[in-house]
Image (cartoon, helix red, strand yellow):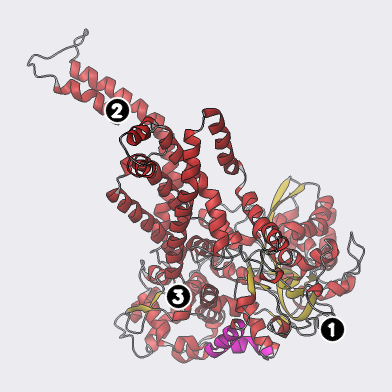
Amino acid sequence: MKQRTLKLIGAGGAVSLLALSAAHADDPVSLTIVSWGGAYTQSQIRAYHEPWMELNPHVTIINDDGSANALAGLRAQAQAGNVTWDLVDMLPSDAQLACDEGIIMPIDHDAVLAAAPDGTPPTEDFLPGSLGECFIPQIVYSTVLAFRPDAFPDDNQPTSIADLFDVENFPGRRALQDRPGTNLEWALYADGVDPDDIYDVLSTPEGVDRAFAKLDTIKDHIVFWTEGAQAPQLLADGEVVMATGYNGRMFDAIEVEGMAADIIWDGQVVEWDGWVVPADGPNIDAVMEYLYFATDTQRLADQASFISYGPARASSAELVGEHADLGIDMNEHMPTAPENYFAPIVLDNDFWVDYGDELRERFANWMLQ
Amino acid sequence: MAQADAGVAPLSMGRPRKEKLVTADGMPLKRALQRAERRRKLAAFLLVAPLLAFLLTVFIFPIGQMMWRSVDNPQVVNALPRTLEALRGWDGQELPEEPVFAALHADFMADADRPRREQAIGPLGIRLNYEVSAARGAISRTARNVASFEAPYREAFLDEHRLWGDPNLWRIIQREGRPLTMSYYVAALDREFDEDGRIVQRDENRRIYVNLFGRTLALSVGITLLCFLLGFPIAYWMSVLPMRYANLLMICVLLPFWTSLLVRTTAWIVLLQQQGVINTLLVQLGIIADENRLSMIYNMTGTIIAMTHILLPFMVLPLYSVMRTIPPSYMRAAKSLGATPFTAFRRVYFPQTLPGIGAGAVLVFIISIGYYITPALVGGQSGRMISNEIARHMQQSLNWGLAAALGTMLLVGVLILYWAYNRLVGADSLKFN
């Protein structure tokens, strides 16, 4: 243990806080880590948890699949004064809300995270805009459009988000998520708005009207999905000819399960996902040690061997290799790969925290009409 | 305990004599009896105490807490005490003057000095964002930069974010600067406050809840009706079959009851979807064309079918238990007196099943009005119910005040319906078993 602590200091110039906390850290400790479950948690277990537990036999990691309702769970635990979660995987917009409420810890990224192998401090190594006041990003994921090639003639396959809104040339039902995020962005993008201007347009009442008007054009052809697993399922069942979904789920369905579908990277909506540390958690010192390890350059690159989400550190990109089980090169499946990242829309979390309530109501109303 | 009271009543009434009765050891009989009674009551109370405590902690208390949350409004009061003081007497028309902004600055500065967990500005932003979009952004941005503000503060705040120059935000701060609010109920009724503080309907494209309440009610009535139409013949058949076969049939009715809800719901997805069993069968039989496959799931039809199936046993069981007790001789007697089979059924048999129908209908209706998982899985959009919206506010938007207001309205609605039922039919006639 002491040896490892020394290594940490040597490697990252870490703060003395870690060394202090490690002094009596050999007592058995179990960390409850909350994540999304399924293939995603599996990738974290294999890339982070197992190596860490091997290095630290006294640490046991308990996985909790509570991320879908993490915000509610964090708030309930904080209000009850009984915080049982040590580390939570959540979306940055939720993290911002939790941070505003003071129920998760602010993070001084340069002080508590490892630098890149070449010494670049974390605040410069993590992708621009990904760090939050209380948020440590792990991955970049994106919401993409996937389609069944067999539903369209060979010489007329969909290639863009505009085709999602073109029911004349590409007939058939489409599966969209039952929330305004992503859908409104795509409606504007398909209507000719430049990806960089989307949120400026969406901040105006006219822009919102324009997005809903565009959605109106395909409304009769939409099936809505709620849970991430539903989208590939609807495609596989032939219920729809196109579906929006998370790129990791689509990768899994296509490459692992063998579903006949193709991904359209045009207009992919890019978002981060990462860790937050509940305030007053039971084992904050042990968690910070774990985080230092689990968010370093190598670990983030390792995770990409188990799931097709891009590492949130620039320095991890060159270390991404093959899929651990399938042996296929993962680089081309990363949302951040240059050939996929040609027209990304970066999800603006501040926008959604500010305007989300109003737009969700309007979207719910629109779905019910 | 009611029984204990009833037991002692005749004794105390039948005691007109003057001389006191005493027990063998000289104690007045009355007191001895009282003591024995008290012991019995205590024993009875101790027996129900665990259940009572259980109900109090997991049922009554959370419901009370929910109702409290729907009006609880501490955020503005906690965060902006000085501003509220300075706002007193503001007429709500023009933008407030410098003293109010100076007080606002003081409130922001005071908040930054508090320990993090006690800071009130973050929750304030979230709270105000429920009333006006972008308020959270305005407040968190201001909080980051407020330390560098210099007098005159009014300009400094207006430069920081446009919302500070919006009298509407100030009206909201003034209105919500009280420990209790009705704004969650106003929102739950698709209404909002206008500039003069009157409650008006929301923009048409933001109204959802009233519509959803109506749909939930309609769906629940429809499902109850369907359960009755499907359950009545089965219950009747079971009640007239010999016990051996009736039990077999009973198992068939109960079997789905013992299967996981999720499994049953998923089974319906397999059956009903467009590429599912039923559609494929119909296409292969040539009844419908391949491109006209029926949409039976991810819409209202899906919700109705799956929920009717799930709730059917709740209708069949009370019906069956009532029908079992109706002697077949009544029908024979009616027929022997000249009634046609239909008249005999209508005037003799059917009225006797009413307690069972009432119990089944109340059960199915009340369960379905709060149903949540099945509509979420198979309801698509048109098959969603109010409970789905409550769950969303509980788990995702985290607007617990609004969730509590919607939940309280649902609860009160059910209680009113039950009260009306009681007035019309009488709850005593319910027969659950």
The type of residue carrying mark 1 is Asp
- Which-is-in-front pick, marks 1 and 3? 1
Q: Residues within 10 Å of mark 1 (few under 14, many from 20)?
A: few
Q: Can residue B430 be seen here? A: no
Q: Is residue A24 above or below residue A265?
A: above
- Compared across the picture, whether B5 is left or right of A274 comes to left
Compare marks 2 and 3 and give the one earlier in the sequence: 2
Disc 1 target residue: A155
Count how many numbered circles sit on residues in the image.
Answer: 3
Disc 3 target residue: B207
Callout 3 secondary element: loop
Q: Position of residue B420 (x, y in %)?
A: 30, 53
Cα–Cα gap, marks 2 and 3: 52 Å
- Which-is-in-front pick, marks 1 and 2? 1
Q: Quadrant of residue A260?
A: bottom right
Residue at 19% x, 13% y is: B27
Residue A210: in magenta span:
yes
The residue segment tinted magenta is: A196-215
Residue at 48% x, 69% y is: B120
The mark found on residue B3 in the picture is 2
Q: Position of residue A284 (x, y in %)?
A: 67, 57
Q: Mark 2 — on which chain does it sit? A: B
Q: Residues within 10 Å of mark 2 (few under 14, many from 20)?
A: few
The type of residue carrying mark 2 is Gln
Report the front residue among A325 and A144.
A144
Report the front residue among B363 and A286.
B363
Residue at the far top in the pictured view: B24
Q: Is residue B167 above or below residue A94?
A: below
